[in-house]
Image (cartoon, rainbow, N blue to C red):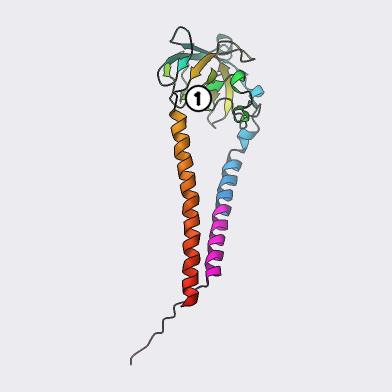
Amino acid sequence: MRHMCDTHLVVLPYQDHILIRIMAIHTLLFVSLLIFSLIESSSGGKKDRLFTDLQNSIEVTAKPVKDSGVLEAGKDMVTITWKLKSSSAKVDTDTAFKTIQVKLCYAPISQVDRPWRKTDNKLFKDRSCPHEIVSKAYDKTPQSLDWTIGLDIPTGTYFVRAYGIDGDGHEVAYGQSTDEGRTTNLFSVHAISGHHVGLDIASTFFSVFSVVSLFVFFVMEKRKAKLEQRE
């Protein structure tokens, strides 16, 4: 006996195609928000940590190799040293240290009118030290590093800060190459001219290209829909 199978091709209206795309976008946004919320909740312990709660138990120095003048990004070097303060060593304040994280930080003069560089007592909100110099396992012996200023470092005035990190990834202590008011032992950096301009041009080009592509896509979809209606 011969069996016949009917195959039906279902063609969705144009409006349904748009609806499906909108639902897909909403689903993607929902999943992204869910992942973000999970990440935030997993780091909830960090949100409660305050800079003023950290022990100032690390001695940090930052001395430009160049004798004087403004340092050039990508060329000049800074000699950085860090160790546990002698007064702190007597009470073993470093027992919780697992990692030392050394960062380049903006001085107050380079934070003026730049909210994206603002200092905040809540560590997860602080934006004053965005440039990591090095992160390595903690060593009780004094450490030294000759650091070449990266090409991505913007023009500005800086100091160096080191954080003592515990096994959970939380900051528990700090030290910095400047005073509490962040006004002494600072150094200035001049960025390579034209480096960021090229990135801005490329970013602008791709942004315009994305908008144009989206516009062309909608035009083609409308034409396709009209042709289907005529047929």
Please identify the residue farthest to the top as the structure is shown: 67
Residue at x 40% of width, y 18% of height: 75
1, 68: nearer the viewer: 68
Residue at x 59% of width, y 38% of height: 43
**Which quadrant of the structure image shows residue 39?**
top right
Residue 147: image location, x then y, percent:
43, 18
Q: Can residue 111 be seen in this view?
A: yes
Against 76, residue 153 (above or below) is below
Residue at x 46% of width, y 27% of height: 152
111, 143: nearer the viewer: 111
**Is residue 85 on the magenta stretch?**
no
Q: Mark 1 points at which residue?
A: 154
Residue 41: image location, x then y, percent:
61, 42
Neighbour tally class for label 1: few under 14, some 14-19, many 20 plus, Cα within 10 Å: some
For the N terminus, the image quarter is: bottom left
Residue 89: image location, x then y, percent:
55, 12
**Which quadrant of the structure image shows residue 106?**
top right
Against 15, residue 4 (above or below) is below
**Is residue 4 on the magenta stretch?**
yes
> Magenta residues?
1-29
Looking at the rendered structure, the kind of residue marked 1 is: Pro
Q: Is residue 97 left or right of residue 45?
A: left
Q: Is residue 183 left or right of residue 17?
A: right
Count of labels shown?
Answer: 1
